[in-house]
Amino acid sequence: MNTGSFGSKNLSELKNYTWAGVVSFLNEQCKSSEMEKTQWLVEKKQYTERISQLEGELQASEAINKDLIQRVKMLEFSLRQERIKYGKLTGGHHRVNSDVISTILSRKEKNSDSIGQMLPKRRTRAHRQLLSKYLQELGLEDIFTGDLPPRQIHHRPSKSYGSNLQALIELPSENNTTPLPKSETVKINIIEDKSVKKSWELKIALKSHMDVVRSLHFTQKEGILATASEDCLIKLWDISHYDSFNENSQCEPYFSLRGHKKPILTMTGNIIGDEQLLYTAGEEGIIRVWELVPPNDVNAYGPAPDKSYCVGIWSGHSEAIWDLKHHPVDGLVLSSSADGIVKLWKTVDTTTSIENWKSGKNSANLVKNFMYPTADGENYHIPTCASWLITELNSFVVGYTTPYLNIFDKQTGKPSIIRFVKENDVYDKVYQINCIATSNSSNFTVCGHEDKHLRFFDLNSCCCVKDLVGHTDSVSSLWMSGNHLVSGGNDGSLRFWDVRTYQCLQEIPAHRKKYDEGVLCISQHPSFSLMASAGADSLVKLYHNI
């Protein structure tokens, strides 16, 4: 009886399990493991950026320390010269008392008339102002005004050039250089540290394209910069030795990828991982996949290789493709086209792409289409740009030619619509969104518009929190890293912003205007302190932090 009841009990429990339930359980486990992997990769990227930031701050502090040491040496040299001149004028001695400043003040009190006749007033005043300037920079300007103890006028000359200033500032030796204490450098640190972080300067201008340069992409490895232009070419530049570049250097691309028959408008690539693939698109309405060529595998001045580095062509759009964006972690690519559709593609690795290309198969799978119908329901709003949300990797934002910003979920496809102007103002101006930049630390995004404005959106509340005029012409490109934003406009300038205060920190005249266009794309290297911009003047310019 017990055995029979036990067997019937197990049988009833087994009947509760179904194939659908088991498959659903396995799918949930797979999704949870993928989410954990994605979160780990995002945290790894954030920690890597934090390490790069701390290394930059360390280099900045070392540069400040070096500059302070040089200033102290200059001050000591000036004091030595003053001692020599004073000694010659007063008594013919080349060396004077170790406390020269107190000696001058005490002698001036007792024998002001005689010293006033012996010393040229104009030169004394000039040197005194110079010393005051150096002391003020070091935060020691109260030396001239402080109460000093009286000293004897006649005494034996000192055996060294030391003074009370050396007691206040000890000059480190060349073999053992240590940073100055915080209490002594805080007065200069506040100013100098900010200038080091925010100041960018032109490094080199790359000249090779024959038409407008529309897109840039820094690769994660090999130190390669890829540029795409309306001359139908993708050029690859070796920037691994960018430290040796200057404004007079000559740098040529080591290889050019050919295959497009119409102007190239956009380009993207993988950010994290070992894959080295480029994705380009333009007026043809197709996406081409390229195998990235390392500089060591190509002779820049030799015969062109017979190998074709195009490993895939994706067809799906009927009109020009304006924007491509690769997912930060997964093998997904977004394409925004003038046909009113945003397509989500799933990519494959390099080896599979090459094998599929040789066998005539497609190297990508179309996952889903995303559309935003107009009020009449017959047409679609035209997307101009898209960007993945770093803080919400299952979502992305899309900008349109109309005053709408949509947040799509890649799984459900349902949009969250953000309308940032009133209905009465729609036809007064052109509110087209030209570019989007998303924050990697908080859930907000910045859009650059045709009406010269920069608009900041809080994606949690789906509203515009700040609207300001960013350029004197339409805003054409954006790049965000941490709390800093770089914007490029058709006025030809680059502007650097602090998103916490919405203030412009620096402006650089970057590119010349041509056909009412200026700066067209901006990108920053993921590990180097290097930024690039390209524009309508066919130039690609590299900037470094100073």
Image (cartoon, grey):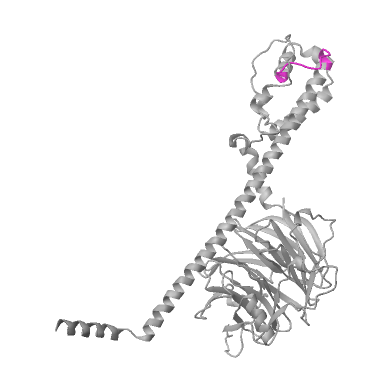
User: Is 92 included in the stretch rendered in magenta?
Assistant: yes
Q: Nearer the viewer, residue 156 or 454?
A: 156
User: Is 63 included in the stretch rendered in magenta?
Assistant: no
Q: Quadrant of residue 531?
A: bottom right
Q: Quadrant of residue 424?
A: bottom right
Q: Nearer the viewer, residue 397 or 332?
A: 332
Res. 371 in view: no
Vertical relation: 88 (above or below) 249: above
Residue displayed at 74% across by 21% down: 161
Left or right: residue 522 compared with residue 367: right
Relative image position of residue 329 (x, y in whole percent): 57, 69
Vertical relation: 446 (above or below) 54: below
Left or right: residue 235 compared with residue 332: right
Query: Hey, which residue is sitting farthest top in the picture?
Result: 154
Vertical relation: 344 (above or below) 505: below
Q: Quadrant of residue 113?
A: top right
Residue displayed at 40% across by 81% down: 24
Q: Nearer the viewer, residue 346 or 67?
A: 346
Magenta stretch prevailing secondary structure:
loop
Residue displayed at 42% across by 76% down: 28
Relative image position of residue 207 (x, y in whole percent): 83, 65
Q: Nearer the viewer, residue 55 or 509?
A: 55
From the image, which quarter does the N terminus lie in?
A: bottom left
Specify start and end residues of the magenta stretch as a single range: 88-101
Vertical relation: 128 (above or below) 247: above
Relative image position of residue 290 (x, y in whole percent): 71, 76
Res. 192 in view: yes
